[in-house]
Image (cartoon, rainbow, N blue to C red):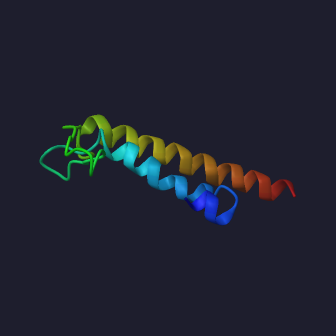
Amino acid sequence: MLWTFFRRPIWEFSAWGLHILFDIPTHSYRFFPTPFLWPISRFEINGIPWSSPQIFIPNIGLLTVFYVWFFVYRRRRESSH
């Protein structure tokens, strides 16, 4: 609908869909299960919560790698100009 309204793709809005895709497998029945087929169905998936080491440790590790890469790359790029 937004593409039709703005007459071009608004890529920032794709974060909503990405957020839902990450929520489905990372929310358990105990903490905010995602009814991603609503209003057609109340089907939910019992996923692995973010607090689980299987999700939490790789998440922190990847965030650290990306932040270090971003700041090192940015510093190199600024010093080369």
Q: Where 52 falls versus 38 (above or below)? A: above
Residue drawn at 58 percent across, 58 percent down: 12
Residue 31 placed where, x, y %?
17, 51
Q: Is residue 30 left or right of residue 17?
A: left
Residue 43 placed where, x, y %?
20, 40
Q: Where 18 falls versus 75 (above or below)? A: above
**Image quadrant where one finds the C terminus:** bottom right
Q: Is residue 44 left or right of residue 36?
A: left
Q: In front here: 43 or 40?
A: 40
Quadrant housing residue 27? top left
Residue 79 placed where, x, y %?
81, 57
Q: In front here: 33 or 67?
A: 33
**Which residue appears farthest toward the right when viewing the image?**
81
Q: In front here: 15 or 77?
A: 15
Residue drawn at 38 percent across, 37 percent down: 58
Quadrant housing residue 48? top left
**Which residue appears farthest toward the left when viewing the image?**
30
**Which residue appears farthest toward the top when viewing the image?**
54
Q: Where 51 falls versus 47 (above or below)? A: below
Residue drawn at 38 percent across, 44 percent down: 22
Residue 77 placed where, x, y %?
78, 53
**Image quadrant where one finds the N terminus:** bottom right
Q: How many marks?
A: 0
Quadrant housing residue 71? bottom right
Q: Is residue 46 left or right of residue 11?
A: left
